[in-house]
Amino acid sequence: MADKGMTRAEALEFAIEHIDNAEVAEVLGKMLASITKPRKKSEAPSKARLENERLLAALVEAIKAHGEPVNAKWVTEHVNGIMTTQKAAAVARLGIELGAIAKVVDGRKVTYTLA
């Protein structure tokens, strides 16, 4: 494995150990503390998750109106805001997670129905 070099934290630790000025060492110590503290994970849902939840409501309504199982291609053609089959699959995955949609796999054919 290749050596990736020194990290910023390692460089600050080295500088703190080898500096004679206490004031500079204190400032470097604060810098070291700020880059090594763990980040707090946000509890709020992401912007993509909120958008997918909005699109999920539209997808559920479209499936209700259609009345039979649909595939991702049908979703892209009939639900506003879902332009690709990848987006359709992502929204359907959220629907499966929330229990609003069921996924039916028949060989390579994947369809979605109301749960």
Image (cartoon, rainbow, N blue to C red):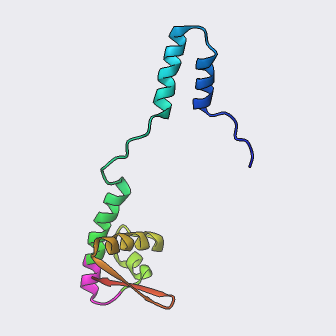
Residue 41 position in % (x across, y down): 37, 46
Relative vertical location of residue 70 with respect to residue 93 in this rendering, above or below: below
Residue 10 position in % (x across, y down): 61, 30
User: Who's the residue at 51% across and 88% down the image?
Assistant: 108
User: Who's the residue at 47% across and 22% down the image?
Assistant: 30
Apparent side of residue 11 relative to residue 32 in the rendered image (left or right) = right
From the viewer's side, name the closer residue of 107 and 72.
107
Q: Is residue 32 magenta?
A: no
Residue 62 position in % (x across, y down): 28, 79
From the viewer's side, name the closer residue of 46 and 8.
8
**Furthest-right residue in this view:** 2
Determine the image quadrant of residue 6.
top right
Apparent side of residue 63 relative to residue 41 in the rendered image (left or right) = left
Determine the image quadrant of residue 20.
top right
Determine the image quadrant of residue 105.
bottom left
Q: Which residues are magenta?
A: 61-69
All told, the count of numbered labels is 0
Residue 55 position in % (x across, y down): 31, 67
**Furthest-front residue in this view:** 17
User: Who's the residue at 37% across and 85% down the image?
Assistant: 70
Q: Main secondary structure of the magenta part?
A: helix
Rendered-image quadrant of the C terminus? bottom left
User: Who's the residue at 37% across and 74% down the image?
Assistant: 92
Q: Is residue 68 magenta?
A: yes
From the viewer's side, name the closer residue of 54 and 107.
107
From the viewer's side, name the closer residue of 63 and 96.
96
Relative vertical location of residue 63 with respect to residue 29 in this rendering, above or below: below
Relative vertical location of residue 50 with respect to residue 85 in this rendering, above or below: above
Apparent side of residue 16 relative to residue 44 in the rendered image (left or right) = right
